[in-house]
Image (spheres, helix red, strand yellow):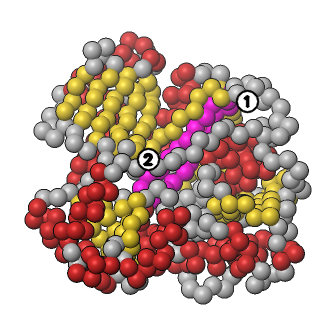
Amino acid sequence: MDEFLSEIYIEVFKQWILMQSNKNLAISLSDDYKTIAIKNKYSTSQVNFYNMNIVEFSVENLIKKEVEFYLHFQIKNIKHAIQLFDEMLETIKQLTNKPALKVLLCCTGGLTTGYFADRINQITKLLNIDVQVSAVSYNNLYKASEDYDMIMLAPQISYMYAKVCEILKNKIVLNIPPAIFAKYDVKKMLSIIEEERNYKRTLAKGMHKPLKAKNMQPSGVKTLCLALIRNSNRVHIVYRLYDENNSILENNEIIKPTLSIQDYYDVIDSMLAKYVDIKVIGLSTPGIIRGDQIISMSIKGLEKISITHDFTLKYSQKFVFSNDANTIALGYYSSKENCSSLSFVFQPVSSNSGAGHIVNDRLIAGHHHVAGEIQYLPLSYSKDVLELHQTPEGAIEAMAKTVTSIISFLDPQIIVICCFLITNIEELKKEVAKYIPKDYIPEIVLIDYLQEYMLLGTLLLCHQD
C-alpha cells in the first residue's frame, strides 16, 4: 500500500473516532496523539496507533478486571477498520447494559432458589441496585455458571461446597446461611452479596512458561503459529512467531465474542508487515480437516473454511493445518521424555469430546482425519452424552467409557485428559476399573491449560517432512 495513503487512512480513522458522539462514553486523545481512550463506569478501552499502520483495540471490564476484547491489525481500508471499531463498541455496550454483578442461586431442583431469586430481583429493581439474580438446579449448575460472577448454594446442597469451589476455581462460591434461606431474607442476602462484591479477591492465575520439545532442531525459517481457543463467552486466537532457532519473537492473542476469516487475515497481515520473511504459517483449529476443507468447527462465522481459496491463494507462505486435539497430543508428547505413545482427550461441557493419539512416536490422524472423533463411538450411556458432560458425575461416566475404549484399541503409555468437571483422577480410575482390569489402566494425567501444548504441536507439524 502506498505509504502516503496509509498515513491518510490513519489520520482519517483517528479523527472519525474522536467525532463519535455518545453521552455514555468519554473519548479523549493522548498528548502524543498515539492513543484514544474510551471510558465509562463499566469499562476502559483504548485505541493505540503504532508504526507500520498497526492499530490496536482493547476493552477491559472494570468489574471483573478482565480483558473482554482485544485485537490489532494493519489498517488497509477505512471500511474494515470501522467494522472492527463497531465490534468493539458493541462489546462496550454489552458491558454497559448488563448488570455489574450476576449471581446464581443453586438448590437441588431450582424451585426454592427460583422463588428467592424473584424476590431479590424485585427489590434490586425497586432500589436500582445493579445486581441480577437467577436460579438453577444442581444438575445444570456447571453449564449455567459460565455466565455468572457469584455462585450461592442453598443449605440442602451446602455439602457440595468444597467440590463446587474446586471445579469453579475462578468464581466466588458461597453457602447461603440456613436462617437467611428459611426466611427468604432479601435484606441480609443483599448484604452478603455486597460484602463479597467489595471484598477484592485475587484469583490465582498460573504462569505457564513456553514449552520446549525434546530433540527439536532449529527450523531455519521464521514460523507463525496460530491456535483457536473457544470458551462460553469469547473466542481467542493465540499466536506466536518463532525465529529460525525456534526462539519466540512475538506472542499475543485476539479476544472477541465472535470470529470471522478476516480475523485470521488481520493477524497474518500484521505479522507479515513486521516480518516479511515469514516462510511457514501453522493453524491449530477445532473441526475435521479433510482435503481442502475444515468442517464441523461449531463456531459461528467459521463454519466451513476452504484452505486453498481462503489461505493458500491469498498468501505465498507454506500453510500447515491441524486439528486442535492432535496438536495438543503432539505438543504434550514432545515435551515429555521416555514416552512413545499417548492419547489426549478433551471433554468440554457444551459439545462433543475430541482426542489426539500418538502411536510409536507418530501422530495418528487417520485416512479421513477422523481418528479421535469420540462422537462417532457407538457407546452406551445412561443418558444423552451432552447431558452427562454438564455434571461432575456424568463427566466421570462419559470420560471413563472414552478412556476404556482408547485403552482397548491403543493401550497407550499415558492418557492425558482435560475436563474442568473432573478434579479427582482416582474417581475416574475407579470408574474405568468397572470396565477393564486395573492392571491395564495406564497413567492418567489431568491438565487444565492447553495453549502451550497447542502452539508447540503446531510448530512441530510445520517442520515435519
- Report if residue 30 is visible in the image: yes
**Residue placed farthest to the left in the image?**
126
The numbered disc on residue 246 is 1
Q: Residue at x 26, y 53 (%)?
A: 100
Q: Residues within 10 Å of mark 1 (few under 14, many from 20)?
A: some
For residue 268, side relative to residue 100 (left or right): right
Q: Is any atom of residue 279 visible in this view?
A: no
Residue located 44% across and 17% down the image: 51
Image side of residue 33 versus residue 415, left or right: left
Q: Mark 1 near mark 2, Cβ–Cβ under 8 Å?
A: no
Relative to 387, residue 30 above or below: above
Q: Residue at x 65, y 68 (%)?
A: 424
Real-space CA distance between mark 1 and mark 2, rounded to the nearest whole angstrom: 34 Å
The number of numbered badges drawn on the structure is 2
- Mark number, residue 425: none
Type of amino acid at the residue the image marks with label 1? Asn
Q: Quadrant of the C terminus?
A: top right
Please determine whether, in this image, residue 301 is positioned above or below residue 461.
Answer: below
Give the residues in magenta. Answer: 222-242
Residue at the front extreme?
179
* Residue found 46% across the figure and 18% down from its top: 52
Which residue was labeled with disc 2?
A: 202
State which mark lies toward you, 1 or 2.
2
Return the x and y of residue 360 as percentages of the image width and height: 89, 56
- The answer to which image quadrant residue 20 occupies is top left
- Please state, as top left, top right, bottom left or bottom right, where the N terminus lies in the image: top left
Estimate the x, y position of residue 209 in percent, counting from the top left: 65, 38
